[in-house]
Structures are given as C-alpha cells and as structure tokens.
Amino acid sequence: MNSSTQSTVTRVNGPIVDAVGLGDAQMYEVVEVGPYRLIGEIIRLQGEKGTIQVYENTSGLKPGDSVHPTGAPLSLELGPGLIGNIYDGIQRPLPEIAQHSGAYIRRGEKVPPLDTERNWRFTPSAEVGQRLNPGDIFGTVKETDLIDHRLMLPPGTSGTVVEIVPEGEYTIHQTICRLDTGSSIRELTMTQRWPARRFRPVRNREDVTIPLVTGMRIIDTFFPIGRGGAAAIPGGFGTGKTMTQHSLAKWSDAQIVVYIGCGERGNEMTEVLVDFPSLVDPRTGKSLMERTILIANTSNMPVAAREVSIYTGITIAEYYRDMGYDVAVMADSTSRWAEALRELSGRLEEMPAEEGFPAYLPSKLAEFYERAGAVTNLNGSPGSVSGIGAGSPPGADFAEPVTSHTKRFIRCFWALDTALANARHYPSIHWLTSYSEYIEDVQSWWEEHDAEWATLRLETIELLQHEDSLQQIVTLVGPDVLPDSQRLVLFVADLIKNGFLQQNAFDDVDMFCSPAKQVRLLRLMVELHRRAKQIIEQGAPLVEIRDMQCIPKLVRAKSLTENDDIKRMDALLQEMIRELDALKEKYR
Amino acid sequence: MSIERGLEYVGLKGIDGPLIFAEGIRGVGYDEVVEIISPRGEVRLGTVLEVDANAAVVQVLEGTEGLSTSRTRVRFQGQPMSVAVSREMLGRVFDGLGRPIDNSPAPFGGDRRDISGDPINPFSRVYPRDFIQTGISAIDGMNTLVRGQKLPIFSGNGLPHNRIAAQITRQAKLLGEDVEFTIVFAAMGVKNDVAQYFIRNFEESGVLDNVALFLSTASSPSIERLLTPRTALTLAEHLAFDEGMHVLVIMTDMTNYCESLREIGTARGEIPARKGYPGYLYSDLASIYERAGRIKGSEGSITQMPILTMPNDDISHPVPDLTGFITEGQIVLERDLFQRGIYPPIAGLPSLSRLMKDGIGEGHTRDDHAAVASQLFAAYSHVKEVRGLAAVIGQEELSPIDKVFMEFGEQFEHKFLCQGEYEDRPIEQTLELGWDMLSLLPRGELHRISEEMLDEHYREREGSEL
Ligand SMILES: Nc1ncnc2c1ncn2[C@@H]1O[C@H](COP(=O)(O)OP(=O)(O)O)[C@@H](O)[C@H]1O
Ligand SMILES: [Mg+2]
C-alpha cells in the first residue's frame, strides 16, 4: 500500500465512517481505523473519499483519526482447527478473545482465527511430478475423530508438485508442498484465504436426490429438505425457530454443521457450547462438537459484523463442501441480518424500499440461498451445502418483506404457528401452511423404507385438511351433528397430532426419530383410519374405535419405542390390525 | 477553556426537538459526553450522535427547553457517558444518570464505567439453571424463572404488573440457599407514585438497604430515560460480577424508554421501521436485555425483570414484539382474567419461560414438573377451544368430556392461577395443586404424562366414568 497519502476519518455516524485519502484503496479492502485500530471494510469509494463499515464499536472515534489500509479484502482463513471453534462475525475466535479481554469483548482485539502453534499430523496424497488442478487434494489432516480435513489447491491454482513433505507433524503455516505453476513456484500450507462474500466455485450444480434426514417427523415425512436444499423457518417469538435449528444441528445427518447465531441471544450460543460436546451423534458415536462450527454474532454485538457473519458461515460451509462433505448451515436469524442491512443502509442515506429495507434486500437474500446446493466440486467429488434460515417476522406477519422475499428463493417453507406454540404443540410447524418442493426429489429414497411412502404421506395430509374443514363446522354447531365417519376423521387427526406431529425436543427417545420409525408410525395412523372407516361404514359406532386397547399405545409409541426397535413397531401394527379385524367381524 | 475539561464553544447552528447542532468544533469523538450550558447558566448533559470535520449532532438528555442558538455554550468531555459504581450505592436513590436525588452526598469513590458496557462474550457466559421460587404458581409451575434470566412482564394500562413485580421481589428465593437478592430498580417515565409504591414495598419488607433506585419519572426529561437502564445495569454488573451478588433488576416501563428512542429517531429524520420506531430498536433493546446473565469466574448473576405496557393490549406492537424476540420468555397479563377478579392475571397460553427446561426437574424442583406444566398448558389450551364452542352452541350442548374440560378451566383459573398477593406457595404445593387440577380430567386424556408418573401422582376418583 502506498503510504504517502495519509488517510483520515472525516465523519462518524455509528458504524459508518467516512474518510479521505483513500485514492489507492480498493473496494471491500479491510482497513484499521483510529487509535484502537478497529477493523472495517471499505464499502464505497468516490475519488479520494470513501465510506467504511466498521465492525466494532466506534465510540470515541474522531474526525482526523487515522485510517490504515491493509491491502487485502475481508477474507477468511480456512484450514484445520475450524471445527469445534466458535467465532464472531469476522472470524475472530471467541475463546481466544476471552483469554485476552475477559468476559466482555473489548474493541480492537486482533486474534488469528486458527491456532498457529498446534501440530497437525499431515498425510500427503500427491506425489512429486504429479499435475494438480484447482480443488485437487494433496494431503489430509485428521481434524477430529470424525473429519478428515482434505487439503486442496485453492480455486484458480494449478501446477506440478515439485516437493511435498513426508507424513509428519506440521503447523498450519509451514510450507508442506511446492508447486510449479509454470510461471513461478507456489508454496502451499494447510490454509488458504478466501473472500468472505464470494461464492467458492464448483464444477457443476446437481439435482437434489437425497433428503437431509433431520429426525423431525413433520419435516422428514411431510416437508422434507434435500441435501443441498434451501429452507426457511419463519415464526413469531417463542414459536420454536431456535429449538428447531438446534435440533437440526444436533440430529440431522449432515457431516459438517455450521451454526450461525446472527443477532440472537448469547445464552443460546452458550447452550450449544455446553451441550454439544457431551451429546453423541447417533450415527457415528462421536461427540457432536467434532462436526460443528459456530459463528456467534449475538444481538448485542456490533451490527456491521452481524451483516458479515452470514457470509463467514456459508463460506466455511462451502470450503468443507469442496472437500466432498455434506454440510448443513443454519442461520438464526436471517431477519436480524436483514435488519443489519437496513440499519447500515439507513446510515448510508440510501433510498429505502419497503419498511425501510434497502431495495437490494431481495438480491442479497437470493445470493445467500443460492449458495446452498448439491454440486460436483472442482476436484470431482460430490458435496452439498444445505441452507436453513430462520426468519423473525415482526408481529408474526409473514407478509413482511424479509419473509415474503425469502419465499422466492427457497423451496422448503416451515411455517411456525403462534397458536400451536401457545397450545404447546411442538414443533409448531403448521401442516397446512408449510410446503416443500423436494418431495418428488426424495420420494425414491423414502420408498426404500416403504414402497407406499408417497401414498401414506398424501393420505395423511388429506386427512388433516379434511379435519380442518370439519373443524370449521364444529366451531359453529359442535361435533355432535357430524356423522361417525366424519368424527372418525377428527379422532384420527387428533391421534396424528398427538402421536405423530408432536415431538418433544426434550424427550430422551423422541427428540430424534429415525426414518424407519417415522414410516412405521405413519403407517399405524393411516392403517387405523383406512380400516376403521370400513368398520364404521359397516355400522359400528365411533366409540368402538376410540375404546380400542391399542389407542393409548399408538399415542405413546413415539416415546416408548426406541428408534431401532423395528420389531416392536411392527408388533404394534399387528396388534392394532388384530383388534380392528375383531371389530370388523363383530359388525359384519 | 482547558483541555482537561474539554473544549468549550459558544453558540449553536440549530436546535431541533431534543437535538442541538454544534458547528466549528474540532477533536470531538462519536458518542462522547457533552455539557450544555444554557443562557441562564444551568448545566445539562448530552451525547454526540454524529460528528464530522466541523459539526456535531448532540442529543440533550435534559431537553432543549430554554436553550438559544446564540448564547448556549457547549463543552465536549472527550469520553463516553460513565457512572462511578460502588456497593455504597445500595440504599440510595439516583436520577437516570446516577446523580443522587435523596439529599445525601454522592457515594464516595467508586469505579467509573462506561454505561454502554461491552458485549458479553458468549464463550464466557455460564448457562443459567438455578430455579428461583417466586411463590407464584403461574410462574413457578408453568413459566419458571431462573437465576440470570431476562423475563419481562407484558402488561397493559391498569393491570397489576407493579403488584406482581413487588410480590416477586418480596418472595423470590433460591431453594436451599440463604442468599438475598440485591435489587436494582430503574424507573423510566412512570409516575412518581409508582416509584413510591416500590420504595414503600421495599421498606415494608426491610430490604431497602439492599436496593439501589434510579428514577427518571414522568416529570424528568424524556431523553434521560435512554440512559437510565444503562446506568442501572452498569451498577448491576459491578455488584454481580465484581462483588458476586445476585442482582434482580426491575426496569419499568420499557414502552416509555422506546418512545424516547423514537423521539430521537424522528428528530434526526431517520426512516422508521414499524409504527414510527427506528429500525435499530431491536439492537438497541438487545444492548440492554443482553446484559442479564451469568459469567465464568463470578458467583454473581443478573436477573432482569423488565416491565412494559402493551399499547392497546396489543402483543404484536413493536415494543412487546421485539422484546419477546430478545428476552428469555415473557409473563403476559390478561385483562379478561383481571376483570374476572383473578390475581395474578397471568395469561395461561402466551406466557413462556424459555429457560424453564433447564431449571426444573430432578435436582432442581421435581421430576414430574416438566410433564405437569406441559399437560396443564395442553389442557388449558383445549379449555379455550371448548369455551369458544360453548359460546356458540351453549354450554348444555357440549359433549360430556368437554364439560369436564370446562370445569377444569374454572378450577384452574380460580385455584391454580389465583392466589393472594401475600401468599407464598412452595413449589411442592404448586405441583400438588397442578395434580389436583389434572386429576379432574380423565386419565386417558393426559397424553403428555408417562404412565409411571400418572401411577404415582394421578388421583383416581370414585365414579370418574368417562
Ligand atoms: N420441539 C420442541 N419441543 C419442546 N419444546 C419446544 C420445542 N420447540 C419449541 N419449544 C419450546 O418453545 C420455547 C421457544 O422456542 P424457541 O426455539 O426459543 O423460539 P423462537 O426461537 O422461535 O423464539 C422453547 O424454550 C421451548 O420451551
Ligand atoms: Mg430464537
């Protein structure tokens, strides 16, 4: 950077700072501002003048204070040591910051994102003389018991290996491979830098074919998300956005989870930090923390860094996707991110569109959700990023700009319902207002579990829709006027709500439901309806069905039957069928 | 004019509502404190909202009445708003900026702290789990408060939120521990008699020595309210995290606070979000509410109980709405219950404690607590549906089971929710009462409770044939 021009602050308006002397600076270049050397990013340039978005509290900053350009854009350091860590919005590790400045985050902390002293065991996989292309893997590091960190050539880099170190212990910044790029020798370490806001390139985008199994029945069975899919979960306060996101982070079958706490509560991040290390992934038997990366820019941390936190999270996700992993990103909440955009835009005195949000809100939302996808990576491996964004519509009104624009860019919509939450029907995802466009994509996967999956699912949804229209009659005239065949619908719908849709995240058994158990529970409900309907048509009163011995077992099967106890589920089905058969005989 | 005292300037470019515009200034920092000396010589305080090479926008905390453009003097202090905090502040009364208003001299010494505070590092937090018994069944049984939680009361005009808050301060205790809560009380824009009500209440229960009050009542300048909760929380942080005390912070009324914030936003010509409130209302409120909690390396805790009145009882109004998005639940008061004479009129369904799950159960309260609460919620929610139906088809036309639910609803409201203002119910009593209520319903209706728990607690009754 040319230091002959001194750059200084000319105006301070919260996190937005104007400066002069930026003739040599570049857009999105990182600068350090004022005596504390606060981190900022240039977001507007006009001749010598520029506007800086500062990621830390600007209290006390004065016109005349100096601005120091760094010559580099806001970029992340990607390499071993990301997993299990917790970062703020601009990738500063919070545990290190705590060591430096105690329980409160002081301004101006500069801490490297990755441990530079730790030794990692490196195993080379490329040989001298081998030609490597962008994304190709030249070695691995065992990052956690679960994750092999595959070291790749950064996008845009290729060459022939001239030297590669033997298997052994190295730190992240040691040169472990030398590459002849044709024009120069490029030294590779375990890390690479990548601009936070830029999409990491792939070879090809692929169709979604496999569900991301979450263990939540209303999601997996009714509104599934595919691996590489994008989903939104909007809801008023207390409806279960965070609980759902936490559940997904715990039990979904992604190999890597990036959890972004964006403008939400500090305690919720603490909860993850406390709970996850001791939770065991049911598939691998390892601690959940061994696949989890946390980004925490809580509501009381600077809003400018909140705006970036989303990109920080998704870029890290793409980096692991590039290695060939299935990654899931949860952002809680995208509304707070949109509000950060709005606040910054307001201070920049931009023309607002709806409700004060900038006109580019939709394109920014699109950019985020577009980064989810199933892909073939540059190195040919398959990988995926599934993106799940929570939304916090004011007054739980889904017509507001963030929710309504989000709907344009996602294919899976889990609508949380305040009335359900108030009735403590959890998860409060409403079965009539939610949707998923991935159903056909994942259908064949589910048919391996039950060839009739699609039919069972559809029948259940139709039954719930039928119940809803009957309820409208009931609220006018009471249930007694309905014939037993319709009261059966009410009865079974109730059973489905209690025994299938409701899933208590604190229930030791039911917090996670395996696909095998899900289809069996569903079949129980559907079979009951199909057969009971016939029996009632034969003239039996509804009370016969209601009083069946197996009904209480049906309601409680979700929490009494372990996930792998398929036998017990099948036995329950047989027991129910026997009882129904007996009734059928009786009324023949 | 000396550098230590800051730079002094005479004359203003303009005055607009609570804002003044100073020109020809140099070396002024964003957010620093300003002394404004009126033509009559009174000194007021302000803070810098925006600054450029030679001008600054300053919000005047005590209002701009009586200021003139030509004869007002402005003195920039070179540092952000701060307050000297110490234990000596307990038992005392201050204004919103921490200046004593009880006719005694300012407490001696103390450590000066920036009232905005710094954000707590999520890594350094300790997750709150200790059950606080308030002696109020609706809270302890169904919306449990834990130490370090931020749990607001959403109220409406004329509803007894002050009485409930006072009852909580009288009764709140930890089971098996003998520590008293230290109370920090912040009043923003409430009438003086509200402040007096609390003072009397503290006096009666003999805890006044353990209370610090920060009063910015309705008669104080509106903008001062913006600093009151911050000043109060700065002391709370000192008491909790330096002195290891368990601090309960009551802040009333957050709606008034938000109105002052709106006033500043409007005066600055900002583009508002909803109902004229600034787009940053959420972040601003979070910078207050997130100062609750516990941190590593300290025994103490800050439990916050903000009180707010919902304009027109509308829970979707931006103030309760954004608060609910930040706090760890909410205690909602319901006018209908109040009018039917039920005290405390705590709404059965929209109330929520998000930290309850970790503060109850074996080792905290009792193993059946979660199930009882969940079942009470579910049953009461059905009561609401049945009542809706009864209003249409008439009570007599209800099915037998729905009639049972109607009866459950009545009893639940009159025996479980309703209690005396001085009635302090131990948690066991609350849970037993819960079982009394649930046992009014047929056992087969209690899906949320395991068979084993039902075997242990459900009270089988003669002839309960349904
Ligand atoms: N699946 C669930 N199982 C049990 N309780 C739930 C579930 N979902 C939500 N809750 C309850 O609802 C409360 C609020 O949920 P939360 O996810 O924090 O809401 P939001 O993030 O939408 O504001 C939780 O504290 C919990 O008590
Ligand atoms: Mg949440």
Image (cartoon, coloured by chain):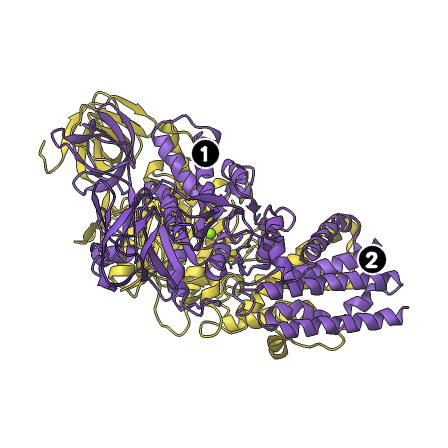
Chain colours: A purple, B yellow
State left or right for residue B465 relative to residue B378.
Answer: right
Q: Quadrant of residue A363?
A: top left
For disc 2, the marked residue is A485
For disc 1, the marked residue is A363
Query: Mark 1, residues whose alpha carbon is within 10 Å: few (<14), some, or many (≥20)?
Result: few
Percent across and percent down for residue B22 are 23, 25
Query: What residue type is disc 2 on?
Result: Ser
Residue occupying image coordinates x 66% and y 65%: A521
Q: Nearer the viewer, residue A564 or A173?
A: A173
Query: What residue type is disc 1 on?
Result: Ser
Chain of the residue displaying label 2: A
Percent across and percent down for residue A450 are 66, 62
Quarter occupied by the C terminus of chain A = bottom right
Query: Mark 2, residues whose alpha carbon is within 10 Å: few (<14), some, or many (≥20)?
Result: some
Percent across and percent down for residue A67 are 18, 35
Mark 1–mark 2 distance (CA, rounded to whole Å) = 50 Å
Vertical order, B57 against B416 (above or below): above
